[in-house]
Amino acid sequence: MNKDKITLCEELADIMPPEYHELVETATYGKEGRGWKDIGSSKELIEQHSLCAGCPESIAFRYILASLPAPENTVFVGSTGCTSLVFPHVAVQNIHSLFGNQNAIASGLKRTLKRRFPDVEKDVVVLAGDGATVDIGLDMTMQSWFRQEKFTTICFDNELYANTGGQESGLMQKGFVAKMAPAGKNFDKVRLPEIAREAGCHYVAMLTVSKPNRVEKAIRQAVMIAREIGPTYVQLYTPCILEIGKQSMEGLDEMKDAESIGGRFVMKEYISDQAQQLIDDMEAEEKAKKKAAKEAKKAKKPVSA
């Protein structure tokens, strides 16, 4: 998707709905420095959704969309789950895979896009829940990492199967009692970030979506590293407030509690040596660009008498 694709046809402009006019006028496609601060003023960053009121996944989706380095050249691969309800509202090209095979689909898609568009970098980003990522789809998730496929995997970790009644998942906390796990889970939460690191991911991050700056930085780094070096993995805590007995306004508090000192979602990050070098180069380039812009602005400033 890019602004060329949504440009209004002059002959039809007068009959197009005002919402479409607004989309064309406010879309951030191609905007340098786009980010989470554009949420609320840009229609394509999910103005409406069909998730539950206050669902942290809706926050995560918005931050991810706003953080993509090149949304016009990005394809999402989704899987069955609560995420499926959002994809019809997403202004980025996307594919809905079968439950658990999202990383296999993404592998073929990334390779095909590379052959089809050799001169344009097409980013592929997997978005799936904990059931699709660590339970039913773990084999295909890990095999894509072993093969060093160049795309990012993002797991929305709500620590259970949220849209099918509350069954336990591999990422559920030990001892947690859910609607369809009345005896409580009897084994520890699977340490998928550690598995990702050992399976060959060059960048791994685990965090909540309570702090937009952190999420934006993690997503940008994950996509850029995957583009240049190899697989990356981001695990976002997006609690299902409905299944854990919280009110619609309590999702943010739940995430903040989980990331407090000693909490299970204190931010963790792993960066390979290759990835760190790329990050350092990108930061140096960004600093040089800002310095050049500042000097250019200073040069244009009139000298006061």
Image (spheres, rainbow, N blue to C red):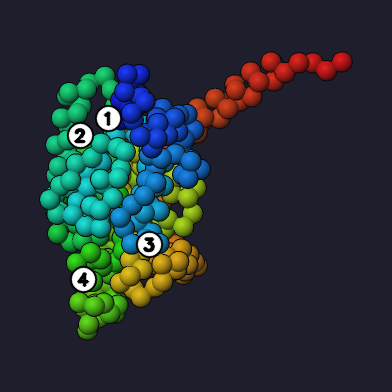
| Camera-side mark, 4 or 2 | 4
| Camera-side mark, 2 or 3 | 3
Name the residue that disc number 1 marks: 122
Figure check: 154 above or below 25 = below
- Kindly indicate whether the residue at mark 2 contacts the one at mark 1 (C-beta within 8 angstroms): yes
Percent across and percent down for residue 145 are: 21, 45
> What's the amino acid at mark 3?
Ala
Front residue of this view, candidates 304 and 26:
26
Horizontal side of 280 relative to 106 (left or right) equals right
> What's the amino acid at mark 4?
Gly
The residue under the point 72% across, 18% down is 301
| Residue 113 in which image quadrant | top left
Name the residue that disc number 2 marks: 110
What's the CA distance linking mark 4 and mark 1?
Answer: 36 Å
> What's the amino acid at mark 1?
Lys
| Camera-side mark, 4 or 1 | 4
- Kindly indicate whether the residue at mark 1 contacts the one at mark 4 (C-beta within 8 angstroms): no
Figure check: 179 above or below 216 = below
Question: Closer to the N terminus: mark 3 or mark 4?
Answer: 3
Residue 144 visible in the snapshot: no
Name the residue that disc number 4 marks: 165
The residue under the point 69% across, 20% down is 298
| Camera-side mark, 3 or 4 | 3
Question: Closer to the N terminus: mark 1 or mark 2?
Answer: 2
Question: Closer to the N terminus: mark 4 or mark 2?
Answer: 2
Front residue of this view, candidates 270 and 248:
248
Name the residue that disc number 3 marks: 53
Figure check: 164 above or below 20 = below
